[in-house]
Image (cartoon, helix red, strand yellow):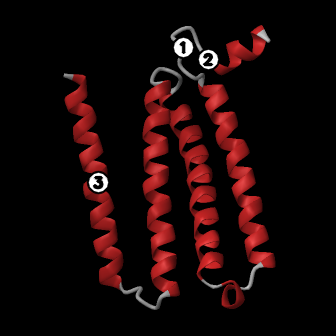
Amino acid sequence: MQTLIIICYNKDNNMSPLFYNLIIIFGTIIFWIGFAATLAGINPEQGGGAAVLLFFINLFFALTGTIYLISYVIRLKIFGKSALYRNIQVSTRQAGLFAILISSTLWLQSQRLLTWYNVILLILGLTVLEFFFISRQSRARY
């Protein structure tokens, strides 16, 4: 039991990066399985809006976890363990924003609303949101 507590939390009583990443890996696998099951077993014409919603929810969380893990590994290789918690925070935020971009683009396409200016507006909106988070973090440091 002592070992489990050491893996889950560090000395500052924060969740350890290892435990956080294990949760993300487990959740990502579950959502990819759910996404595959949705693709294989649900007909969107018969399932209606609930089937489409299930498709996009599974896709969003599966993409968020996958993009987070890739981003985290790349940041870990570039920056090392010096800014470990910062890497987790930035990777999580950017993975969520990128998954929103992909999921929204696919939803727009499913509704036959995907145009180049809609994609540009979506990218601009997400960029403004990212700049808001960056400016908020820089103010928190001072």
Residue occupied by mark 3: 129
Rate crowding at label 1 as few (under 14), some (14 to 19) or many (20 or more) other CA atoms within 10 Å: few
Q: Nearest the camera: 93 or 8?
A: 8
Q: Secondary structure at mark 1?
A: loop
In the image, residue 1 sits, relative to residue 129, either above or below, namely above
Left or right position of 92 against 119: right
- Identify the residue at horizontal 46%, vertical 75% (top origin): 105
Marks 1 and 3, how far apart at CA: 30 Å
Q: Quadrant of residue 129?
A: bottom left
Marks 3 and 2, how far apart at CA: 31 Å
Rate crowding at label 2 as few (under 14), some (14 to 19) or many (20 or more) other CA atoms within 10 Å: some
Quarter that holds the C terminus? top left
Q: Secondary structure at mark 3?
A: helix
Tell me where residue 118 appears, x and y as whole percent: 33, 80
Quarter that holds the N terminus? top right
Tell me where residue 49 appears, x and y as whole percent: 59, 81
Q: Nearer the viewer, mark 3 or mark 2?
A: 2
Tell me where residue 53 appears, x and y as whole percent: 58, 73
- Identify the residue at horizontal 29%, vertical 43% (top origin): 133
- Identify the residue at horizontal 42%, vertical 56% (top origin): 97
Residue occupied by mark 1: 13
In the image, residue 78 sits, relative to residue 141, either above or below, namely below
Q: Earlier in the sequence, mark 1 or mark 3?
A: 1
Residue occupied by mark 2: 9
Q: Quadrant of residue 24?
A: top right
- Identify the residue at horizontal 71%, vertical 89% (top origin): 46
Rate crowding at label 3 as few (under 14), some (14 to 19) or many (20 or more) other CA atoms within 10 Å: few
Q: Nearest the camera: 70 or 105?
A: 105
Q: Secondary structure at mark 2?
A: loop
Q: Are marks 1 and 2 in contact (CB under 8 Å)?
A: yes
Q: Earlier in the sequence, mark 3 or mark 2?
A: 2
